[in-house]
Amino acid sequence: MSESREGLQRQTWKGIGGAWAAWLIAILGTGLGLVIVVWDAEIRGPSKEFVAAVMHATARPVDWFAFVFWVIAILWAGLLALRLRFEKEDVVARTVQQLEAITSAVLEAPNSSVVEAYPKVYYPQFVEALGRLPEKRGDTSAAELARRIQKALGIVAEMAREYAGKPVTVAYGANVMVVLGRDNFEALKDRVWPVLVPEEVWGLKALLVLPRDLLFVSTKTGDSRAIPPLVLAVPQRADTVDGYPIAIPGAPRALLGDGPSILMDTRNIGKECSGLHEGIVAQILAYFSPSGRGSHVRSFASFRLKEDPDDPVGILNIDSSDTSLLGPRREFTVIFQALLHPLLEKLAPFVAVYVKEAGPGLCRPEELSGEHPVDVAEARAE
């Protein structure tokens, strides 16, 4: 008997949180508002008389119109209160679930020893690799800054591989893409990937450029894989008004979004590109296909160097030749991101100084050596 009562309570509570309850509350609230606007006098007068009669304990005929209005108003208020209580408890329940998942992720991380070693090994090594931040422009050359940043990127890539518990045979790479204004498009248009259709060029917000000097290719000794230089187009926003993604996964989405952009398996990248032009989707699928120039990248993660979206400086990308570069569970990413955050804060000012020292050289196509990620003529023909 008690079990059936509890089941009924659960069903009722579930119903209060359902879509029908939200619609009912909205319809009742709108209806009550309209009744007040149209029949204000018919409700206010009898209501005052009823209250006075109750206070003075005198009898008076019931005004059924006002009576029904107040019954519905009380029901609406009750439904609204239950709905708010449900949403509050639902938020609390979800938060508890997330905390439990993150707690278990700390205990079950593929290699929790990385968390223990971080303050004594990875963080000091990273800071030492970067060295002292130049106090004024000209103190350190762009080449020297790039050398330091590359060394620091190698430490990040190795930390990610160790954290995921991957063997040394799995290659991890890291790079930094810098943010340039859309006014650089004309100079770099032949390097932009994916190749844009003409009507999409006007909607650009920025460009993300991968200088060859800010690229750590691989943690794997003797790895001959080649990372093509990239200039990625960044649209004005990450998604359409309907919620379809229009910024490609990776650095562009990390630049525009509220958190990192992580792809556990590049073979599934098509699912993340539902709002893009079909020609662009075809280029992305071809690039990450088994025969494409990005076939060696099976998973990647992109992190904005600075939290301020109006002054992001750049994007740190980590890639792996295996799937699930930070572990098989999304919660593992949260732990790694917490480890990475202080490193990003240290790295950001060095990248900003590098950009200033490199100057216009970042926009010269000859600085982006190597093959374009796709056949440009073929892509434009499509």
Image (cartoon, helix red, strand yellow):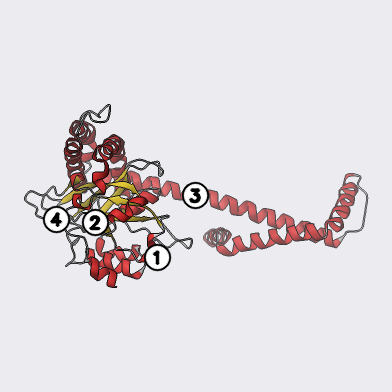
Q: Earlier in the sequence, mark 3 or mark 1?
A: 3
Residue type beneath disc 2: Ser
Q: Earlier in the sequence, mark 4 or mark 3?
A: 3
Residue 267, position as x, y percentages in the image? 25, 64
Using the numbered discs, state the Cα–Cα distance from disc 4 to disc 1 in whole angstroms. 32 Å
Residue ID for mark 3? 91
Residue ID for mark 4? 226
Residue type beneath disc 3: Val
Q: Residue at x 45, y 61 (%)?
A: 240
Q: Earlier in the sequence, mark 2 or mark 1?
A: 1
Using the numbered discs, state the Cα–Cα distance from disc 3 to disc 2 in whole angstroms. 31 Å
In the figure, 343 relative to 41: above or below? above
Q: Could you say whether the residue bearing mark 2 is in a helix, strand or loop?
A: strand
Q: Earlier in the sequence, mark 2 or mark 4?
A: 4
Q: Earlier in the sequence, mark 4 or mark 1?
A: 1
Badge count: 4
Q: Nearer the viewer, mark 4 or mark 1?
A: 1
Using the numbered discs, state the Cα–Cα distance from disc 2 to disc 4 in whole angstroms. 16 Å
Q: Could you say whether the residue bearing mark 4 is in a helix, strand or loop?
A: loop
Residue ID for mark 1? 199
Q: Residue at x 18, y 48 (%)?
A: 212
Report the residue that reaches farthest toward the bottom. 382
Give the quadrant of the C terminus.
Answer: bottom left
Q: Nearer the viewer, residue 248 or 371?
A: 371
Using the numbered discs, state the Cα–Cα distance from disc 4 to disc 3 in whole angstroms. 46 Å
Position of 342 with respect to 30 (left or right) is: left
Using the numbered discs, state the Cα–Cα distance from disc 3 to disc 1 in whole angstroms. 42 Å
Residue type beneath disc 4: Ala
Q: Residues within 10 Å of mark 2 (few under 14, many from 20)?
A: many
Q: Earlier in the sequence, mark 3 or mark 2?
A: 3
